[in-house]
Image (cartoon, rainbow, N blue to C red):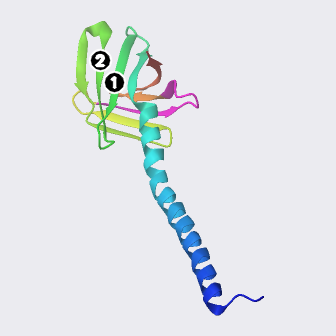
Amino acid sequence: MRPTIKQQRASAFRLSSVVMTLLLALLFSLALAPVFVKAQDRAGIVGDWEGTLDPGAQPKKRIVVHISAAQDDSLSGTIDYPDQETSGIQITAITYKARALHFESSSIPALYDGTMDDDHTQITGTWKQGAAPLSLILKRTP
């Protein structure tokens, strides 16, 4: 027995409803993917990072960088020099994207460019303050 035209239309309608539902679910998940990636990206950089500057003829200087994220995912931070009992130096510009960290502080003036390792435990980069750039490895602190 052949299905009637009415039955064929109902079957086609059910099929198109399922396809549309799946298509909408796929589009919704793709739209949210960048939000989740961005949040995970930011979470990898948030925290406290410590390293040691070695200016050669001068004494070594420990540096601690505190990075936090606001609810809108914007980053902010401060810099401490524990050996000099200096803390809370404001980071005036900060970006983190695809494992690349860049921050600046206009008050000291200094800037840092580094790359996060695969384990998210260490950032290797260059600290620029004054004439000579210095290598600076920042390690995540507990």
Quarter of the view holding residue 105: top left
From the top left corner, tell me how far across and down residue 9 is, in percent: 60, 86
Q: Residue at x 24, y 13 (%)?
A: 86
Secondary structure at numbered mark 1: strand
Specify the amino acid type for callout 2. Answer: Asp
Image point (65%, 86%), residue name: 8
Q: Which residues are magenta?
A: 110-124
Q: Are marks 1 and 2 in contact (CB under 8 Å)?
A: yes
Furthest residue in direction bottom, as rendered: 5
Residue at which label 1 appears: 66
Q: Residue 87 lies in what quarter of the image?
A: top left
Q: Please say whether residue 114 is one of the residues in the magenta stretch.
A: yes
Helix, strand or loop for disc 2: strand
The answer to which of 48 and 134 lies nearer the viewer is 48
Q: Position of residue 129 (x, y in %)?
A: 34, 27
> In the image, residue 6 lies at what x, y percent?
61, 89
Q: Is residue 84 above or below residue 67?
A: above
Q: Nearer the viewer, residue 41 or 97?
A: 41
Task: Kindly identify the residue that appears in the image at 36 percent across and 28 percent down.
Answer: 131
Relative placement, left or right, of 58 versus 98 is left
Q: Main secondary structure of the magenta part?
A: strand
Which numbered circle lies on residue 80?
Answer: 2
Residue 105 is inside the magenta segment: no
Answer above or below: position of 42 versus 88.
below
Residue 66 position, x and y percent, is: 33, 24
Q: Earlier in the sequence, mark 1 or mark 2?
A: 1
Q: Quadrant of the N terminus?
A: bottom right
